Image (spheres, rainbow, N blue to C red):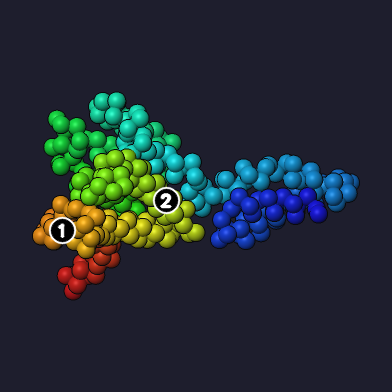
Amino acid sequence: MSAIKAYLDELKKSLPRHLQQEAEAEVYSHLEALTQEFQQTGLPRLTAEAKAVQHFGSPHTIGSAWRRAAGVVDWSDILLAALPILGITGMGWTLVGQYIPLSIYLVLFGLGAGLAWWRDWPTWWYAWLGWLFLAVLIVPPTPWMFIITFPIIVTLLAIDSWQYATLMTLPFTTYLAFATLIERHQLVTTGWGPGNLYPSNMIWLETAFSILWIVILAASLRAARPTRRGVYLVAGLIGTQTIYIGAVVLMLLVGKLMPGYFITTLTTHEIMFVKLPVGLLTVGLTLYPLFVWLIARWLRQSGPHIDSHRTT
């Protein structure tokens, strides 16, 4: 196998499928040009190929640069974006998070968002900015700051990029929805098994839903084409919220259909007038950035037509 062929095979391994053909063609043209230059100095073909490959740089480095230029998100970006939820839910909160003052979270999330902005990492800058606002909401003296600033910032951001605005709302459309809909003591057993599905298993449930959040984030941000990323993200979030609502309805059905084994504090009235509105509110918040972006786009497109109509 020639050195160029081996190089291109390694390069394709570091790229998603939709980028491989274009990258292979362009890199091949550069390597072939270098090879011909070295051949003109008297080197045989195979030696010239090996030297061209050596001068061009490692395929991993070239592939990483190509992914960045094409907007492909690496796993390191996703882990950084997901890091906050691992620290404030489930096992992370039980082992470490609960011993950290909430004011420290304000500083950590603020520094994380600032660092991501400075390094031009928008993928997780907006996610961390959302966690910063979540901390602002939770810290007792500062909820008013959240109520005033968060809707304004999300709206202004959504006008230009509804995907980034959706990333910023992630903490409120995922974990808070889960924490509000699935509460402790909503479904308990009558004596068999663990005796109580919550709170003994609440830590594991929170951890499981945190992992689900990360999987959704990863699937959306690493979508085959960056243009589809936002659609994947919204679809995944709405799917997650549907799971939350479905779990609440399932608790009620289990408690009603098997009263000898389960006891539930949920009622049909509570689901219809408390749980379901909360679920619909989180779905609405998920769709809000897209709605704002569509309105802004419509206004931009109709603006010239309105002006020209007035002048006539």
Q: Which quadrant: the N terminus?
A: bottom right
- Residue 220 quadrant: bottom left
Given the image, on which type of amino acid does mark 2 rest?
Val
What's the CA distance linking mark 1 and mark 2? Answer: 28 Å
**Which mark, residue 215?**
2
The one of 254 and 75 positioned closer to us in this rendering? 254
User: Do the residues bearing badges 1 and 2 touch, measured as CB atoms within 8 Å?
Assistant: no
Give the image location of residue 245, x and y in percent. 24, 58
Q: Is residue 294 left or right of 223 when viewed as pictured?
A: left
Give the image location of residue 201, x and y in percent. 31, 43
Given the image, on which type of amino acid does mark 1 rest?
Ile
Q: Does residue 288 show up?
A: no
The residue mark sitting in front, 1 or 2, is: 1
The one of 265 and 208 positioned closer to us in this rendering? 265
Give the image location of residue 160, x and y in percent. 31, 53
The one of 199 and 23 positioned closer to us in this rendering? 199
Disc 1 packing (10 Å; few <14; some 14–19; many ≥20): some
**Which mark, residue 271?**
1
Q: Vertical placement of 3 versus 245: above or below?
A: above
